[in-house]
Each structure stands twice: as structure tokens, then as C-alpha cells.
Image (cartoon, grey):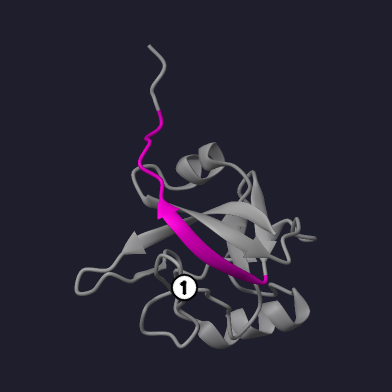
Amino acid sequence: MKYVYKVVSEGHYDKRMKSMVVSDKSDLCLTYAIGEKTTPKVGKIFAFNKLLSARRFAPGSTVLYCKATGVKKPNFNYVPDIFLEYFKDVKIFWKTLAIGSMMRLPIAKGTVLCDSITPIRICKSRMRRKK
């Protein structure tokens, strides 16, 4: 068992948090709650090996400290820009790791892939600015 940091957006109507980059209209959108295990239907869960990496990825966002299974570094350098709602392409990406004609983004520093995560707590500390 390893520990990772997951960037999420907080739910407005309930206590569940959700994936930052996949639209909640998609069946691929994962939700997270403290103490509850989350396993994706397709692919892996993107997380970070350090809090600083998670904070740099999305400054000001909520970050969860999580127990994780199957943690490993990605064996690819780019991911599809899944802010776009081409969910069929996301499924193809996880099957083949091919981006094809999709817009792509470089993997953020410190990214790891997980089979599942169980949030333990919300990280309260914020990045400090250099004076």
C-alpha cells in the first residue's frame, strides 16, 4: 500500500468530491469520499506522489491524501485533453494508449497511476509563496 495525493473538485450538493478533469456528465467521472475506496471503470486513476506536485498542477484546488493500490509511474508522456467531452476517445486511449488526433497535454511532474484510491483526509496546507 502506498500513499498519494489526488486533486479533486468539491461537490456543491453533497459531500462527495469528483475528478477534476472528466465532466460529471460522463460515466467515467469518478467520485471520492473520505474512507471510501474508488476504482475506475476504465483505465487508472491519475494522482501525484507529492503534495507539492498536486498543488502545482492545480493551485487552490482541493487535494486528498489517499491510500492507493497498484501505484506506478506512467509509461507515456502525453494524455488526451479530457476537458473536451470526447469520452469514447478517452476509452480508446486507455485501451491502446494512443492519442491520435485528440488534443494532448504533457504529463504533469510527479504523476502516478493507481488501480484504486481510498481518501484518508483533505490536505489543509497551502503552497507558500517565496518572499
Q: Amino acid at mark 1?
A: Glu
Residue 78 position, x and y percent, is 68, 59
Which span of residues is magenta-colored? 115-127
Residue 33 position, x and y percent, is 39, 69
Report the number of numbered marks. 1
Q: Looking at the image, which residue sits at the far left? A: 13
Residue 94 position, x and y percent, is 69, 78
Q: In this rendering, would 103 be left or right of 16?
A: right
Does 122 lie within the magenta span? yes
Q: In this rendering, would 4 be left or right of 57?
A: right
Q: Looking at the image, which residue sits at the far top? A: 131
Instruction: Please give the name of the residue rendered at 59% of the width and 59% of the height, measured from the top-left corner.
Output: 67
Residue in front for this viewpoint, 24 or 68: 68
Residue 43 position, x and y percent, is 66, 78
Quadrant of the snapshot with the N terminus: bottom right
- Up-down relation of residue 41 to residue 116 (above or below): below
Does 37 lie within the magenta span? no
Other residues around mark 1 within 10 Å, as few (<14) / some (14–19) / many (≥20): few
Quadrant of the snapshot with the C terminus: top left
Residue in front for this viewpoint, 19 or 99: 19
Q: Secondary structure at mark 1?
A: loop
> Which residue in the protein does label 1 denote?
36
* Residue 47, quarter of picture: bottom right
Instruction: Please give the name of the residue rendered at 77% of the width and 80% of the height, measured from the top-left corner.
Output: 96
